[in-house]
Amino acid sequence: MKVTVSRKAHFNAAHRLYRKDWSMEQNDAVFGKCNNPKFHGHNYEMIVSVTGEIDPETGFVMDVKILSDLIKEHIEEAFDHKNLNEDVEEFKNLNPTAENICVVIWNKLRKQIASDKDLEVVLYETPRNFVTYRGN
């Protein structure tokens, strides 16, 4: 029997959506006000879910405290109150769209969670705009 354990977390970060190889006009046409050269910010919310078999000894799929600590160390400390374009190595050459941020978060956490567990990340850029990545 597989069960999913989830942890909700958040971080605040600034970003700018643009491509260095495009003109300002093309960036404005595609990214609109998100192309602001002075950046803009979001209060990101995320739900990280781990699915797997329940360990018969502990009764856990994964200890939620461990999941919380992994999120804090690898995501919140890396992204919170940062300019994603300028301060986070993964976005030096990757447009920090919600989709790309979600995949980066998933990749960072995937390395930390047992391979026999499934991982899903849901990232809310706003209360109504969110993306989901499951590694496929």
Image: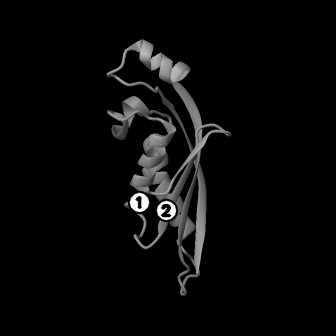
Q: Are marks 1 and 2 in contact (CB under 8 Å)?
A: yes
The mark that comes first in sequence, 1 or 2, is: 1
Q: Is residue 61 above or below residue 100?
A: below
Numbered label attached to residue 29: none
Q: Residue at x 41, y 13 (%)?
A: 24
| Image location (x, y in percent) of residue 1 | 58, 81
Q: Is residue 4 above or below residue 122?
A: below
The residue that mark 1 highlights is 110
Of residues 127 and 132, which is closer to you in this image?
132
| Image location (x, y in percent) of residue 79 | 46, 41
Residue 73 left/right relative to 58: left
Q: Is residue 18 above or below residue 135?
A: above
Q: Residue at x 50, y 23 (%)?
A: 31
What amino acid is found at the position of numbered circle 1 in the picture? Arg
The residue that mark 2 highlights is 119
Q: Residue furthest bottom?
A: 56
* Quarter of the figure with residue 61: bottom right
**Number of numbered callouts drawn:** 2
Q: Residue at x 49, y 59 (%)?
A: 69
Secondary structure at badge 2 equals strand
**In this orientation, does residue 25 appear?**
yes
Q: Residue furthest top?
A: 25
What amino acid is found at the position of numbered circle 2 in the picture? Leu
| Image location (x, y in percent) of residue 86 | 37, 29
Of residues 29 and 84, which is closer to you in this image?
29
Q: What is the crowding at mark 1: few (fewer than 14 residues within 10 Å), some, or many (at least 20)?
A: some
**In this orientation, does residue 35 appear?**
no
